[in-house]
Image (cartoon, helix red, strand yellow):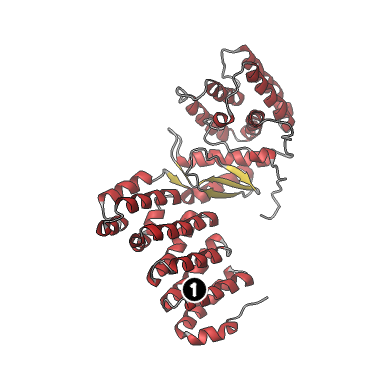
Amino acid sequence: MSVKLEDYEDFLSDVPAIRDVLEGTFHEAARTMSPTGLENYLNGAKALCNLGRGNDLVVTYLQEMPLVVKECGEDIIEDCLTAAMKLSSMTSGEVIMLMFQSLPSAARNLGDAQLLRGYLTFIHQFASTAARGLRPMLNHIDQLLTKLTLSGLRRWATFGAQAYRRDFDNLVTYFNLESADSKAMLQKERRGVLFVRIQRKLNFYLRALWGRDFFVRPTGADYTDFRPYIEHRILHVPDAVDNVGDVSGLDLYRATAGHMASHMCYSTAPISAEQLSPAQMFFIGMLEDARVEYEAGMEFPGLKKLWMSLITMDEENQEKAEHETMPVLLHIAHMLMDETVTIDDEQITAFVKKFHNEIQARQDDNQFSWHMGMELFHLFADRKAVPSLRILERIAIPYRDDNRYVWEFEEFDFNTEY
């Protein structure tokens, strides 16, 4: 299937101003989009034209959408059009045009199609609660999204909308970034390092280690129990992180992505979860983390040193642990990484010694993780000291993922198309 401008002659002959713009953007759009995407792009222009909100809206859409597609893929076109149609019943054509103008910056700063969809949802919700603030906010969206995650933007906007719901002058001042509380809230919601700022460095880092490319995507991490995860061979990391003590946000990203990449590089089969309780799966996953980190640490001592610094740091912050076993588990994680670390507990000492005695010979065998994990579980079960799953999953090792990949393994081939 091929799409030609001639197929839209009836539409273009009615709006000569749009023809001139489209002739300039069509070839660029054709390089970025498939025939189906190109058809959706042109049909979207017709639909916006039929809204009767002026040619400037359609022209802006035609100019900006190829840039958005380049960042987030052509499936986003329909989401953008749907968002525009929803806004059309709530605000002016000029504001809808500003929304389209904001999309390339939002796509570039958010770095992910799903996050951009979240941005479109946010715009719609915001228009229904504080429509007068939408225009000034959109005029500053690039400045806002270079400093805030989507979650941070939402919280910043919600504060202003609630504080000045009936004070329209101060509402506009807030969203124009002119008021003191607007700047204060902006500073409060800023995170240490945004993923999009270090994405290229992170990709280069992983390639330097393993000589291959990995797909790493940002994910909204605005809830307490968020953990990075691997899904469909894609590493999903937080859209922003703060420094952890002396460890920079960039190094935290490196530790996280390095750990997840280790799972992919040193796993050849799933571990069976049959007849296992969630707590047992946690303990097995903890030993599987130790196994893949052993392999990676043997190849890349610098990566092991980075992981060690994070585990040691979190160990020192366990005075207010929710369950007495959690500091012990964190210390065991440290011991599994460094055999010189000790504990005043004969059973745990013997367990860790067994791990270090056997890991070199069994480093490629995740059944070793299964057996050792079950042994550790029973050690604590016999003491009636196994915390609830909710507490277990909050173990303070910030760079580790949720281990779903351990159980939902997909064979990883560097030559596979993503």
Residue ID for mark 1: 62
> Amino acid type of disc 1?
Leu
Residue nearest the viewer, comparing 306 with 379: 379
Where residue 384 appears, x then y in whole percent?
61, 18
Q: Quadrant of the C terminus?
A: bottom right
Where residue 41 appears, x then y in whole percent?
55, 72
Residue depicted at 54% across the width and 24% down the height: 326
Residue 216 left/right relative to 157:
right
Residue depicted at 48% across the width and 42% down the height: 223
| Other residues around mark 1 within 10 Å, as few (<14) / some (14–19) / many (≥20) | many
Q: Secondary structure at mark 1?
A: helix
Where residue 382 appears, x then y in whole percent?
65, 16
Which quadrant of the structure image shows residue 38? bottom right
Q: Is residue 285 above or below residue 74?
A: above
Where residue 240 appears, x then y in whole percent?
47, 45
Residue 292 left/right relative to 145:
right
